[in-house]
Each structure stands twice: as C-alpha cells, then as structure tokens.
Amino acid sequence: MQQGIVKGDVLQRLAGLSFIAGAILLIVFNAIFPRASDPADVGQLVQKIADTRGGFWEVDHLLLAVGIWAFMIGATGVYRSISTGGAAVWARLGFYGVIVGTTLFTVLFALEGFGLPQVVELWEKAAGADKAALFQVASSLAWMNAGLFSMTIIVYWLALLFLGVGMALSTVYPKWLGWGIIVLAAAIIIVVGLPQAFAGPSQLVTNTLFPILSILATVWGLALGVWTIRKAW
C-alpha cells in the first residue's frame, strides 16, 4: 500500500471519477425524490408510491443506490491512499463502515424502491377486507423501512466521519476536506439519524433537514472527486 496519491494511479482515477459520478446522481435524484408531504402519514406514502410506481419511483431508488455504490468505490481510494500512522487506523475504520452502510442502503432501496411498490400494486387491485389487510402490510413495511433508514443514516455517516478523521490527520488530503465531512456527518447523525430513530419521521427532519444536509455532504464528495482527479490524472 502506498502513502499519498500518485499520478497515473488507476485506482485513484477510478475513485475520483466515482465520487464525481456518484455525487451527480445523488444530488439530482435526492432533490427530485418523490417525498410525501407528511412522511409520518402512511396513507400519503402509499398514495405517493401508487402515483409514481411503475417507473419513476423505482428508477429514482435504483439510481440513488448506484450513487451510493459509486461513493463506496471512491472511499476505497481514500482508504488506500492513507497507509501510515493513526490516520490509517481511522481511514480503515471509516472504509469498513462505508461497506456496512452501503449494504444497509442497498437493502433499504430494495425494500422501499421495489418491494413496497409490489404490495401497493396488490392493494390498488384488491377490494374489501383484502384491501384493508394489504394496507396494513404496506403500513408495516413502511414503518420497518423508516427504522432501517434511521439506522442506515447513523451507520453510514458515522463511517464517513471516521474517514474524515483519517483524512484530517493525514498529510495526503487538505485539512478542509477532512473537517468538512466530519462536521457534516456529525450534523446528519445528531439532527437527522438520532431524532428519527427515537421519534420517527417528520416533515422537519425527514423532508427538510435530511435533504439539505445530505446534498451538502454529496457536494463534499464532488469536491473530493475533483481534487483526486487533479492529483491522479
């Protein structure tokens, strides 16, 4: 393993491009995500899925997943570029955490983006007692997804915080890149992940604070990708 970023390094080139591509996907499809006006109202969520199912709902979730996968590739480049001292320990913890967080995101997007719409489709076609029963199934899945979302937020951004500590302690990256994600990740955990985990989804936390902070964190990924490309190309 090497310390630093060497021009011509294929992994670092791929990492930089992945950060840029992932950031673009996450910014765009996070901004246009079809959110219910009240995320705590399951009826609104079910109707929103019914209105956008069969195309936009599924595509949006799939491309958000691709963006998260691209960020994992980018994190590989950060992890491999820091190989000595305490910074390497933090970078390694962060990278392993990103793998776990990416796995959780993948499961979340699979359930919410593809599993739940199938239940909603059955609900639309059903009548009487079957329709009521299927709504309860959809409601249960929605609340399970809300809990999984909260845990995913905490795990994923805690991993990015660790990665940021490694970057800030290293001599490889500018200090502002490390501290930038430390602050943003801590903010997302404190004002989004923990409140939603204990109090459930809300308009303020889920529909306002999370999109704003997550897009800012994605802009950080875009900046890191551009910086990496300029060093490695």
Image (cartoon, rainbow, N blue to C red):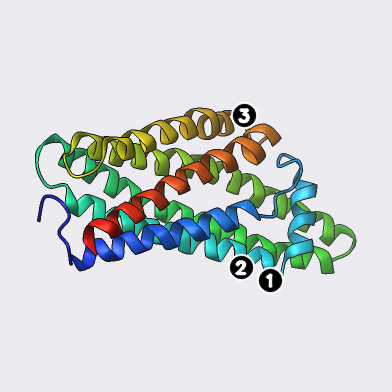
**Residue 118 x %, y %:** 68, 67
User: Which quadrant would residue 22 be assigned to in this image?
Assistant: bottom left
The answer to whether residue 35 shows anywhere in this view is yes
Give above or below for 171 relative to 1.
above
User: Marks 2 and 3: CB-CB under 8 Å?
Assistant: no
Callout 1: helix, strand or loop?
Answer: loop
Mark identifier at residue 59: 2
The answer to whether residue 69 shows anywhere in this view is no
| Camera-nearest label, 2 or 3 | 2
The C terminus appears in which quarter of the rendering? bottom left
Q: Residue at x 66, y 55 (%)?
A: 32
* Residue 68 located left or right of residue 64: left
Q: Residue at x 64, y 44 (%)?
A: 143
Q: Which residue is mark 3?
A: 199
User: Marks 2 and 1: CB-CB under 8 Å?
Assistant: yes
Give above or below for 159 relative to 72.
above
Identify the amino acid type marked 2: Val
* Residue 106 located left or right of residue 114: left
**Residue 206 x %, y %:** 63, 39
**Residue 153 x %, y %:** 48, 41
Identify the amino acid type marked 1: Gly
Q: Which residue is mark 1?
A: 55
Q: Residues within 10 Å of mark 1 (few under 14, many from 20)?
A: few
Label located before the other in sequence (1 or 3):
1
**Residues at marks 1 and 3, CA–CA distance in whole angstroms:** 32 Å
| Camera-nearest label, 1 or 3 | 1
* Residue 93 located left or right of residue 158: left
- Nearest the viewer among 158 and 199 is 158
